[in-house]
Amino acid sequence: MFDLGDRARTAAESLARAPTDAKNAALIAIADAITERTPAIQAANRRDLDAGRSNGLAAPLLDRLELTDARIRSMSEGLRQITALPDPVGEIGEMRMRPSGLQVGKMRVPLGVIGIIYESRPNVTADAAALCLKSGNAAILRGGSEALASNLAIAECIHDGLAGAGLTRDAVQVVETRDRAAVGLLVTMESHIDVIVPRGGRGLIERLSREARIPIIKHLDGNCHVFIDDHADPDMAATVAFNAKTYRYGICGAMETLLVGRGIAPRVLPGLAARFTDAGVELRGCEETRALVADAAPASEEDWETEYLAAILAVRVVGDIDDAMEHIRRYGSGHTDAIVTDDLTRARRFMTEVDSSSVMVNAPTCFCDGFEYGLGAEIGISTNKLHARGPVGLEGLTTQKFIVLGNGQVRG
Amino acid sequence: MFDLGDRARTAAESLARAPTDAKNAALIAIADAITERTPAIQAANRRDLDAGRSNGLAAPLLDRLELTDARIRSMSEGLRQITALPDPVGEIGEMRMRPSGLQVGKMRVPLGVIGIIYESRPNVTADAAALCLKSGNAAILRGGSEALASNLAIAECIHDGLAGAGLTRDAVQVVETRDRAAVGLLVTMESHIDVIVPRGGRGLIERLSREARIPIIKHLDGNCHVFIDDHADPDMAATVAFNAKTYRYGICGAMETLLVGRGIAPRVLPGLAARFTDAGVELRGCEETRALVADAAPASEEDWETEYLAAILAVRVVGDIDDAMEHIRRYGSGHTDAIVTDDLTRARRFMTEVDSSSVMVNAPTCFCDGFEYGLGAEIGISTNKLHARGPVGLEGLTTQKFIVLGNGQVRG
């Protein structure tokens, strides 16, 4: 494993200075290889699926593990899309002339070696490798052991694509052991790996956080709120709230609790509740909510705390924006929270005072996404406060160094 | 201690929305209080000094502990200077219209609660409190126990200054126990503290890193290099190299190893070596260096690795820029490294390829400093790659959240 780390470190140095053209050529060559070798990848995938079935892997895990034709096409398409993104490496900014006569600015550079730890989705192998490559970083990939044959088949395409573009194969390495201890070792290899990006559930992330000696870009809970202020347009409020919940139940940006101002609740809640009920969303409300929405179940303290990721919604009537922000402060997870209002001062207060990685005005929380934000692609969504917060694109896989240009100045 | 953490969390919420005027008024009130109560602060300081002497505290530690008139004036002056810095909180940038019609940008916000752990310099109490306050963060300060009386006397000024400006006293709290276990507890209070900034030696930082469950802005070694390229102007090269070493021996940006191109070495090294020797700098050279500089001692492998922080300089003759960069890669600490050259291509290569937090062209490494870089003030110099790298000013004590403005868009 340390050997793998040494190779990654060496690869990172050459990758940091690889021209954009070479990185894009590799991405296209990898995409082509994946398309051409679809039968071989699917054969490897069938071995994983067969083993998974005999080991009694649960149906949703088997589903994630499967590389259908559509998923393989989408991997290949994803690689091509990343070639179109601007290369963040080498960008120079904030260059200023100082009183000393020195010019001081910042240059964007790769982080170095990125460890990606993920579960049973083999398509992450290609996605994560592509983002690390484009941002000039070497990658060490550790996927779920039940997907190892699939991951290795994809890695073969990656290695050939890299070599075809004149880049080192060690730029992307897959940990080949099925031993779970490998993960514990990876997160402590501080001289070999600069950051760990876990792609998986809360259990995985919490375990890694406990053991890690390396910074982790964490993605924890998304207990997201929409607050309908008394000064909201009732139609817009209903549209935003409905979309925030029903766009997709399982995403981290899905609304989990709806807060409604006492003044507007009678005008908005009954109709909106009917829309939710028609769509199959179970409602759990406070007492005031239940007075307006007959078929809402009573909400408990636990409901305010829960990220359902399901067709369940907690609803609470609040006195004003202060009560709404207090609820969010107390129960929210600092992921994404939105206000619907036409009052500029309240919009400004909500935007300034709510301490979440994304704060929205008159937009549904489900828009929290790297593509929607214009990052082009997304390696994950960070709930950390330091380094990267919210959706993490290529820029989140880089850092900045200071550059100083002079002509022989001395400090005295 | 958790009680202290809870109070800090609450203070951080109100501080995050404190207007710049109130923060500046508090800084001035604190500066005034420190000036007015100089006798009381010095009386407390004498108690610390007396206790230190009876406990056999070493002379350099006693020196750092002492609050002379000049040091108190400089504390007070530092506070006033911070009022002049622009407030980073609330700054909105990168606001772009997305195809969906949403505007997406970033707003700069405080990190929350910052823990500062420092050794026996009581002036850090005022400096660190001021930077945290101006950047809208609550601070928990844990200074060396031998400075506790001094720190509490300064904290009294801080608390009165805060209260006078209508801000909560809990914005800055000093840990009052002398128990060393308090530090171990602080660095694990992840729900109360967002980042730890240690101000002290390597031993302190390494100990904290091992125990911490919270991100640490680390300041480790500064093994800095100046490389004199064959295409350098010999006079400029000598000026830059001499200043890089002799401006101050004890700072982390001081040059520790001088690398000289083989082609220019005979023209530059003998004269430069004489200047160093006259200034009392001991030279330790490779064989080629010793052939040109008779009184240089032989350098060992250990010399290349050492951050002397003293009047000792390692000197090595190298074949070309590749050899120089290979030496820096192998022995450097990624802090600050400089090239002296008039060749644009080599300058560009050095700037791009050397992976250090500051990379300089024709400027001495001792310029690595928050004031010189225009950050206004500096809480420390980070050798981390993530979040803040190099000198850390007010901006390094903040983070960015995404803000999204719409008019009822839906994702579909």
Image: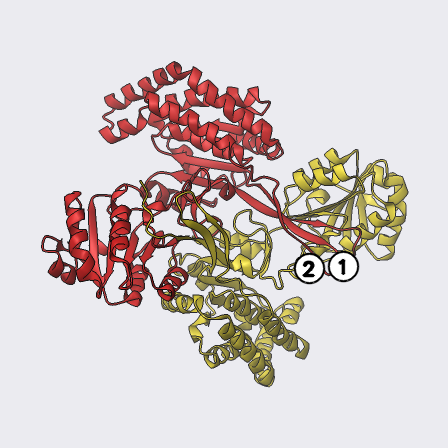
Chain colours: A yellow, B red
Mark 1 is on which residue type?
Answer: Arg
**From the viewer's perspective, is B109 left or right of B82?**
right
Q: Chain of mark 1?
A: B
The reply to whether the C-beta atoms of the residues labelled 1 and 2 are less than 8 Å apart is yes
Q: Position of residue A94 (x, y in %)?
A: 51, 51
Quadrant position of residue A378:
bottom right
- Mark 2 crowd level (few <14, some 14–19, many ≥20, 10 Å Cα): some
Pick the quarter of the image with the C terminus of chain A.
Answer: top left
Mark 2 is on which residue type?
Answer: Glu
Q: Which mark is on residue B332? A: none
Position above or below: B378 against B337: above
Position above or below: B96 against A385: below
Depth check: give the residue in front, B47 or B393.
B393
Q: Which mark is on residue A372? A: 2
Q: Which mark is on residue B411? A: 1
Position above or below: B369 against A166: above
